[in-house]
Image (cartoon, rainbow, N blue to C red):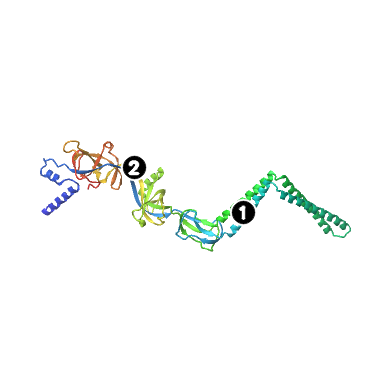
């Protein structure tokens, strides 16, 4: 090897040792004088933390309007006024369209008059007859009896004339019919007078009450029909289509508006087949699957949250993916159907998990391990020196540079101020004496 090559090799080795946190002087001393004890390696350590970590899988997806609502009028007629425009946001019960209501207003007034008349008749029956009503009824009876007397006299004269062939049979029969009508009028007048004098019976009161209830029902129906002339939004949302204009004639099968619900919006998410089993297991467990979406059109720092609503059971042979759907909260209506988003699906959550920085976990023979720093208790080395203890661990969720340790530290958790080495741990051995270097964070800086 040439001199230049050797220099390059030694330079690379030195750089690697610096990166790994191994003091160069320690290595040189070990090479030049193997019998001289190696320098104590410098390390950095941080306290172990308990925090909640979430395993989130990212997929691209598309937003779809959750619900299209066709608004149908309950009243047929001519469109008198359109109160909204396409793309207008509306709240529930906002007026969308008004229909000409002159006919139903007339029906309502007629029904109201009939209701008032029925109520007055019932009040009279319950109250009993007044003196004026009795006098009027008696006068009616007297007049009917006088009319009957006149009709009977006319009948007697007509019978005599008919016997002498002075009048025809039809003229005679006409006087006979007049007598019959006069008898009926007398009977009705006497019955009305008797009812006024005796008061209404219980059955008559019940009949009048039923009549009033029927009149009130007809009035209420007419009032509702008049209200139906104002076509309102059944849900909050956005006006997607407005297929009618002023002057159009509509019936109860004609949609006057199409609304799109915007309080929540549907997310359609194609998920690779390799994750099928995991999602099916979550779905069968009944656990809520949280979703956060980031629409690039609104900025990469805004998240909208929701829940998975359906996990598809069919894998597409063309794409090799299955569909999951989620409902995303959209309180301000910023999300729109057709938007492309990045979706982050939480498939596992570890609450109060024991966590360490990612750089604390290294490999020994294919096994994940961490090195715990146990400070020396006495002598000059107290506080600055300590022992590195290697512990086999099972890493779990990794999030934001932190790693969950599912198991391995049970025997150490009772110790206060437990620290894990995050820098200078690449070539450590179990039980090795170490000294604190510059304190660093998760990246060992």
Looking at the rendered structure, the secondary structure element under dot 1 is: helix
Residue at position x 74%, y 50% in the image: 135
Q: Residue 100 in the image: x percent, y percent?
A: 56, 60
Q: Quadrant of residue 370?
A: top left
Is residue 184 in view? Answer: no
Residue at position x 34%, y 48% in the image: 56
Q: Residue 335 in the image: x percent, y percent?
A: 40, 55
Kindly give the residue lying farthest to the front in the view shown.
131
- Compared across the picture, whether 425 is left or right of 319 comes to left
Give the vertical position of 218 relative to 287 (above or below): below
Looking at the rendered structure, the secondary structure element under dot 2 is: strand
- Residue in the foreground of this view, choosing between 41 and 61: 41
- Compared across the picture, whether 162 is left or right of 272 comes to right
Is residue 194 in view? Answer: yes
Residue beneath label 2, please? 351
Residue beneath label 1, please? 112
Q: Residue 231 in the image: x percent, y percent?
A: 52, 57
Q: How many marks?
A: 2
- Compared across the picture, whether 353 is left or right of 308 comes to left
Give the vertical position of 324 relative to 165 (above or below): above
- Residue in the foreground of this view, choosing between 178 and 350: 178
């Amino acid at each position: 090897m040439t001199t230049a090559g050797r220099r390059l090799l030694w330079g690379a080795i030195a750089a690697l040792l610096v990166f790994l946190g191994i003091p160069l002087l320690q290595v040189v001393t070990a090479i030049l004088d193997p019998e001289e004890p190696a320098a104590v390696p410098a390390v950095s350590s941080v306290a172990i933390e308990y925090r909640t970590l979430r395993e989130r899988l990212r997929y691209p997806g598309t937003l779809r309007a959750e619900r299209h609502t066709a608004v149908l009028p309950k009243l047929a007629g001519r469109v008198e006024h359109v109160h909204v425009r396409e793309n207008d946001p509306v709240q529930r019960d906002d007026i969308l369209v008004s229909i000409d209501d002159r006919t139903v207003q007339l029906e309502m007034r007629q029904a109201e008059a009939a209701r008032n008349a029925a109520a007055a008749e019932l009040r009279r029956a319950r109250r009993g007859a007044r003196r004026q009503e009795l006098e009027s009824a008696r006068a009616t009876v007297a007049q009917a009896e006088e009319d009957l007397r006149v009709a009977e006299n006319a009948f007697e004269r007509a019978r005599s004339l008919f016997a002498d062939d002075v009048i025809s049979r039809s003229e005679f029969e006409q006087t006979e019919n007049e007598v019959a009508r006069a008898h009926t009028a007398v009977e009705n007048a006497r019955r009305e007078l008797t009812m006024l004098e005796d008061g209404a019976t219980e059955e008559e009161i019940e009949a009048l009450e039923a009549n009033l209830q029927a009149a009130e029902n007809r009035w209420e129906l007419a009032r509702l029909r008049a209200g139906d002339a104002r076509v309102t939004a059944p849900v909050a949302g956005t006006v997607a289509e407005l297929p009618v204009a002023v002057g159009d004639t509509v019936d109860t099968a004609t949609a006057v508006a199409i609304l799109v619900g915007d309080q929540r919006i549907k997310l359609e998410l194609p998920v690779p087949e390799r994750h099928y089993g995991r999602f099916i297991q979550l779905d069968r467990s009944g656990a809520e699957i949280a979703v956060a979406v980031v629409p690039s059109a609104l900025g990469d720092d805004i998240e909208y949250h929701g829940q998975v609503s359906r996990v598809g059971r069919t894998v597409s042979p063309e794409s090799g993916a299955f569909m999951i759907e989620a409902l995303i909260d959209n309180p301000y209506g910023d999300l729109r159907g057709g938007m492309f988003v990045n979706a982050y699906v939480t498939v596992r959550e570890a609450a109060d998990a024991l966590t360490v920085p990612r750089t604390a976990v290294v490999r020994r023979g294919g096994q994940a391990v961490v090195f715990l720093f146990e400070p020396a208790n006495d002598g000059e080395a107290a506080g600055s020196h300590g022992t590195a203890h290697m512990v086999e661990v099972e890493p779990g969720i990794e999030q934001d540079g932190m790693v969950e340790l599912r198991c391995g530290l049970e025997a150490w958790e009772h110790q206060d101020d437990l620290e894990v080495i995050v820098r200078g741990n690449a070539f450590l051995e179990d039980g090795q004496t170490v000294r604190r270097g510059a304190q660093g964070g998760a990246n060992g800086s």
